Amino acid sequence: MSLQHEHEFEAAPGLPEALPVNEHILWQGAPSASLLAVHALHTRKLVLYFAVMLCVQALYLAGEPGAAVWPSVLSSAALACLCLMLLAGVAWYSARTTLYTLTNRRVVMRIGMVLTITLNLPLKQLESASVRRLNNGAGELALGLKGSAPVGWLHLWPHVKAWTFGRPQPALRCLPNIQQVSELFMQAWMAENPQVQVQRAEAVDPTNSSVSHGRVPLQAS
C-alpha cells in the first residue's frame, strides 16, 4: 500500500502515474453527492432533529406571555437551513474531488477536499471486502486491509467504513451502481489471488429492510 500527497499532474484521471503494461482500468467512478449527504453527513436525520427542536421552541415560546414566537422560530429555521446547505455543499465538493479507480491489480482512491491524497491499495493486500446496499441499487464497498491502514480514520473520512477506528477500512462510498462494482472487484481479486479460498456471507440489517450487508472474507487455503 502506498500514499501520495501530490498529483498536480496526473498521467490519467485519478492516477498519479501511468499504469504498467500488464495493468488496465476496469472501472472508474465517484460517489453520489446526494447519497453522501444522506448517509455520510446524515442530513436526513438532522432535518428531523431540527424539526423537533423548532416545534419544542415554538411550544415553549407560546407559553411565555408577550413572546415573539414566529420571529424567533423563523430565525432558528433559517440557521437550520444554513447548516443543511453547508453540509450539502460539503457533500457536493467531496464527491467532486473524489475519484475511485479499480484496475485488474489494485484499487486507487483519489480523495480529500483540502489536502488531496491518492491511496493505492493492491488487491493482494486486501483480506476482506464488505458491501453495504442502499436504496435503488446504490451501495458502498469497504476494504479490509492486511495490517494497519496507511492513514488514520479522520484522514480517510468520509471514505471509510463507520466505526472502524482501531483498524480503518477504506471504503468506496455511496456508489450508484454497487452491484457492477462489487462484481468487477471480486473478479479482479480472484484473478489476482488464485491460490486463496473465498468465503461468502450475507446478512440483512433487521432495523432497515432497505439496507443490507454482505461480507466476503478472503482467506488463504
Image (cartoon, rainbow, N blue to C red):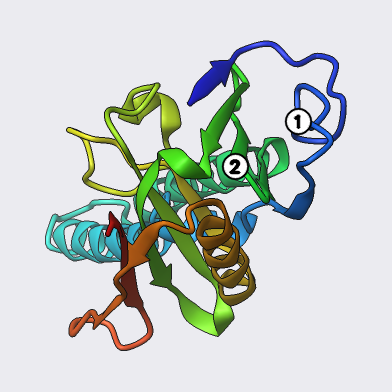
Q: x, y percentage for residue 165?
A: 21, 35
Residue 106 numbered mark, or none: 2
Q: Where 214 sits versus 45, above or below? A: below
The quadrant holding residue 42 is bottom left
Specify whether residue 171 is in view: yes
Q: x, y percentage for residue 198?
A: 35, 67
Callout count: 2
Q: x, y percentage for residue 122?
A: 53, 37
What amino acid is labelled 1 in the image?
Leu
Is 60 displayed left or right of 167 in the figure?
left
Number of residues whose C-alpha sits closer than 10 Å to that of mark 1, classed few (under 14), some (14–19) or many (20 or more): many
What amino acid is labelled 2 in the image?
Arg
User: Are the residues at dot 2 and dot 1 in contact (C-beta closer than 8 Å)?
Assistant: no
Of the pair 84 and 71, the residue shown nearer to us:
84
- Give the label, 2 or 1, closer to the camera: 2
Q: Which of marks 2 and 1 is nearer the N terminus?
A: 1
SS of the residue under disc 2: strand
> In percent of the image, x 42 and y 41: which residue is there?
170
SS of the residue under disc 1: loop
Of the pair 100 and 80, the residue shown nearer to us:
100
Q: Where 97 sits versus 174, above or below? A: above
Specify whether residue 158 is in view: no
Q: Where 76 sits versus 214, above or below? A: above
> In percent of the image, x 29 and y 49: which residue is there?
162
Is 90 displayed left or right of 218 in the figure?
right
- What residue would you read off at disc 1? 15
Mark 2 and mark 1: Cα distance apart in space: 11 Å
Of the pair 157 and 78, the residue shown nearer to us:
157
